[in-house]
Amino acid sequence: MELKIRKLEGDEMGFTLSDSNPAFANALRRAAMREVPVMAIDEVEFEVNDSAMYDEILAHRLALIPLSTPAKGYVLPGECGCREGRCPKCSVSLTLKREGPATALSGDLKSTDEEVVPVSGSIPIIKLERGQRLELTAIARLGFGKEHAKWQPGVVAYKYMPVFELNEKACDGCGACVKACPVNIIKLSKGKPKISDITLCTMCKGCAEACPPKAIRIGSDPTKFIFRIDSAGGMPPKQILLKAMGALKGKLDEFSKQVKKL
Ligand SMILES: [Zn+2]
């Protein structure tokens, strides 16, 4: 198995996984989206809510604000000795006080831990009219994407590596495929189509359909995968990947323990 980073920039990561199979690629994708714990608001106590929205709707909005998650330092509420999910080891409290006319923003949330804060300060929560007040205390905790989408660290997707096959004898070099390609990755070189970057191919098969002598076949390689990780901003994409691998390894270790007991 081979992993090659194609892009690593801010919250985006692209890599190619080779010499693998669909089961592993999908296990990795699911582990990254479901088994990597991140911080999210899990409980809200409203002291004052004069806004036009119900407490429940505001709580839902608050929960979906991505929070930065430090690599170490917090434990899952279920694994904490406090059992209530309220102590500084397993929770962070964020307070918000705002009076209209104003728009309450994610940046108005004041956290007890500077490492657990909204990744963007400009996410609107609610517009407050003159005299309307909003005062609340939100409790953020670690959780898993498999429990609620608010705990997904980001979006992880993959596609099979596209394969462009050319029947050189049938190809007459007409260039129809060049024009048909929506992502412009086909060029004519010495009268024959050549692909500049196959990873950009969307497998639309436009080139194969446009080719008069039907000399092109578009397929896919089930041993090679093009992955993309888009972090919600709370955790760097490389860390999401490493933690996903750790989660998979943990499951296998547990499985091996069970087998040894047989
Ligand atoms: Zn605790």
Image: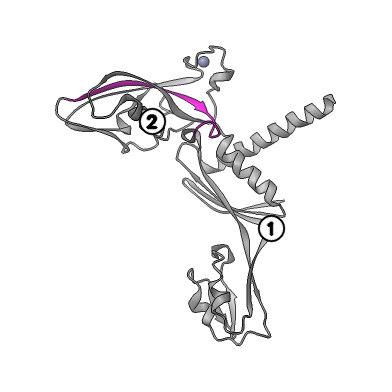
Q: Is mark 1 within 8 Å of ligand 1?
A: no
Q: State which quadrant residue 252 falls in.
A: top right
The residue depicted at 31 percent of the width and 38 percent of the height is: 122
Identify the residue position indicated by label 2 in the image: 60
Q: Secondary structure at mark 1?
A: strand
Q: Position of residue 165 (x, y in %)?
A: 66, 73
Range of residues picked out in magenta: 132-148
Identify the amino acid type marked 1. Answer: Pro
| Residue 46, above or below 239 | above
Q: Residue 10 vs residue 189: left or right?
A: left
Q: State which quadrant residue 193 falls in.
A: bottom right
Identify the amino acid type marked 2. Answer: His
Identify the residue position indicated by label 1 in the image: 222
Q: Residue 46 vs residue 249: left or right?
A: left
Q: Main secondary structure of the magenta part?
A: strand
Q: Secondary structure at mark 2?
A: helix
| Residue 147, above or below 200 | above
Q: Position of residue 38 (x, y in %)?
A: 51, 31
Q: CA distance from mark 2 to mark 1?
A: 40 Å
The residue depicted at 54 percent of the width and 13 percent of the height is: 83
Q: Residues within 10 Å of mark 2 (few under 14, many from 20)?
A: some
Q: Position of residue 59 (x, y in %)?
A: 36, 27
Q: Is 77 one of the magenta-colored residues?
A: no
The residue depicted at 82 percent of the width and 29 percent of the height is: 259
Q: Is mark 2 within 8 Å of ligand 1?
A: no
Sequence-wise first label, 2 or 1 = 2
Q: Residue 55 vs residue 32: left or right?
A: left
Q: Residues within 10 Å of mark 1 (few under 14, many from 20)?
A: some
- Across the whole image, how many numbered discs are drawn on residues? 2
Question: Residue reaching furthest top?
Answer: 82
